[in-house]
C-alpha cells in the first residue's frame, strides 16, 4: 500500500473543510429533531473511540510501516473530528450526547477481541453501515445543516473505506483461496449482524426521515458488495506484483 499517499491525503484533508452553518434554524418539526438527535448521538458515541487500542496494537505488529502508523493516527484524529461535527448536530436538534449505549459497548467488545486486523475489519463494517445511514438521511431530510454535515462525513468515510481496503487487501493477498473464502464469509456474517443492530437502533430516525428497512438494507448491502470487490482488486494487484517481481 502507498502509505506516503495516505499520509499526505490525511494531512491535506485537514484543510479545506467547510464548516456547516450551525446557526441556520432547522425546518424540521420538534419530534423529528428529537428522533434524529437520539439516533445521531449513538453515532457520535461511536466516533469517540480515541483510537488508543488500535494505534497500540498496530505499533506492536511486526514490521509495522512507520508512515502507515502516522497515517493511522491522522485517521483516528479525523474520526474525532466526526465526533465533534455530530455533537454539534445533536445539540442543534435539541438533544444531548451520551456516554454509554449497548450498541457502542457491543461494538467495542467485538473490535477489541481479535487484534488489529479484526479491529480494522469491524471499523470498516461500521463505516459501510454508517455510509448507508448518512446517505439516506441526507437524501430524505430537508435540513441544510444536516446536509452539509453528512456531505463532509460521507466524503471522509469514502476515503477511510479505501484506506482500509488497501491495507486489508495487502494482508489478504497472503491467504490461500480457501482461507480467503472463509474470510469473506465471516466478513459478510459480521456485516449482516452489524446492519441488523444498526437498523434496530436507528429505524425510528430513518422511518421519520421517510426511509424504510428495505432501502436501508439495500444501500448497506451495496456498500458491502463494493467493499468486497475493492478488497479483491487490491489483493489481486498485490499478488500480481509478487508474481512479476
Ligand atoms: Fe467517522
Ligand atoms: Fe471513518
Image (tube, helix red, strand yellow):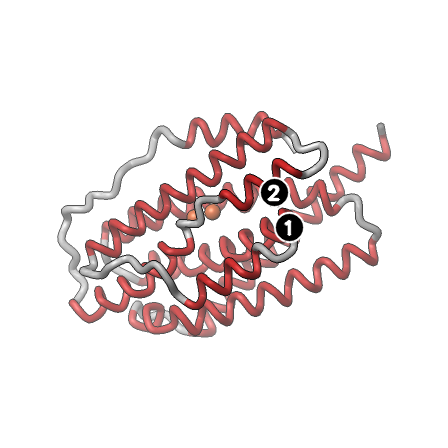
Q: Residue at x 59, y 44 (%)?
A: 164
- In the image, taking residue 34 as reference, residue 73 lies left or right, namely right
Q: Residue at x 49, y 60 (%)?
A: 129
State yes or no: Cβ of the residue under disc 2 lies below 8 Å from any atom of ligand 2: no
In the rendered structure, are the residues bearing label 1 and label 2 in contact, judged by CB atoms less than 8 Å apart? yes
- In the image, taking residue 236 as reference, residue 194 lies left or right, namely left
Task: Label 1: state its secondary structure.
Answer: helix
Q: Estimate how packed mark 2 is, as few (under 14), some (14 to 19) or many (20 or more) residues with alpha carbons within 10 Å.
A: some
Quadrant housing the C terminus: top right
Q: Residue 20 shows which numbered tag?
A: none
Residue closer to the observer: 22 or 214: 22
Q: Residue at x 39, y 61 (%)?
A: 136
State yes or no: Cβ of the residue under disc 1 lies below 8 Å from any atom of ligand 2: no
Mark found first going from the N terminus, 1 or 2: 2
Q: Residue 233 in the image: x percent, y percent?
A: 70, 45
Q: Residue 227 in the image: x percent, y percent?
A: 60, 52
Q: Residue 191 in the image: x percent, y percent?
A: 58, 63
Looking at the image, how many numbered discs can be counted on the residues? Answer: 2
Q: Estimate how packed mark 1 is, as few (under 14), some (14 to 19) or many (20 or more) residues with alpha carbons within 10 Å.
A: some
Q: Residue at x 62, y 47 (%)?
A: 116
The residue carrying mark 1 is: 115
Q: CA distance from mark 1 to mark 2?
A: 7 Å
Residue closer to the observer: 62 or 8: 62
Above or below: residue 37 compared with residue 61:
below
The residue carrying mark 2 is: 57
Quadrant housing the N terminus: top right
Above or below: residue 159 compared with residue 223:
above
Task: Label 2: state its secondary structure.
Answer: helix
Above or below: residue 7 compared with residue 200:
above
Q: Would you identify the image quadrant in which residue 35 lies?
A: bottom left
Q: Residue 209 in the image: x percent, y percent?
A: 30, 67
Amino acid at each position: 500500500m502507498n502509505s506516503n499517499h495516505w499520509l499526505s491525503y490525511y494531512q491535506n484533508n485537514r484543510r479545506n473543510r467547510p464548516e456547516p452553518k450551525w446557526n441556520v434554524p432547522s425546518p424540521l418539526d420538534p419530534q423529528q429533531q428529537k428522533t434524529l438527535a437520539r439516533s445521531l448521538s449513538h453515532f457520535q458515541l461511536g466516533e469517540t473511540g480515541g483510537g488508543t487500542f488500535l494505534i497500540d496494537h498496530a505499533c506492536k505488529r511486526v514490521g509495522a510501516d512507520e508512515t502507515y502508523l502516522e497515517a493511522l493516527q491522522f485517521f483516528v484524529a479525523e474520526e474525532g473530528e466526526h465526533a465533534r461535527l455530530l455533537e454539534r448536530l445533536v445539540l442543534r436538534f435539541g438533544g444531548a450526547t451520551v456516554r454509554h449505549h449497548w450498541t457502542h459497548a457491543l461494538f467495542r467488545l467485538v473490535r477489541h477481541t481479535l487484534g488489529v486486523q479484526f479491529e480494522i475489519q469491524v471499523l470498516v463494517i461500521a463505516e459501510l453501515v454508517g455510509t448507508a445511514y448518512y446517505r439516506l438521511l441526507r437524501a430524505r431530510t430537508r435540513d441544510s445543516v444536516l446536509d452539509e454535515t453528512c456531505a463532509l462525513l460521507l466524503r471522509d468515510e469514502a476515503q477511510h473505506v479505501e484506506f482500509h481496503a488497501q491495507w486489508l487487501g495487502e494482508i489478504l493477498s497472503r491467504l490461500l483461496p480457501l482461507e480467503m473464502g472463509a474470510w469473506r464469509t465471516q466478513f459478510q456474517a459480521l456485516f449482516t449482524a452489524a446492519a441488523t443492530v444498526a437498523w434496530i437502533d436507528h429505524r425510528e430516525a430513518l422511518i421519520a426521515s421517510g426511509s424504510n428497512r428495505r432501502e436501508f438494507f439495500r444501500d448497506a448491502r451495496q456498500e458491502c458488495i463494493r467493499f468486497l470487490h475493492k478488497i479483491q482488486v487490491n489483493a489481486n494487484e498485490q499478488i500480481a506484483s509478487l508474481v512479476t517481481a
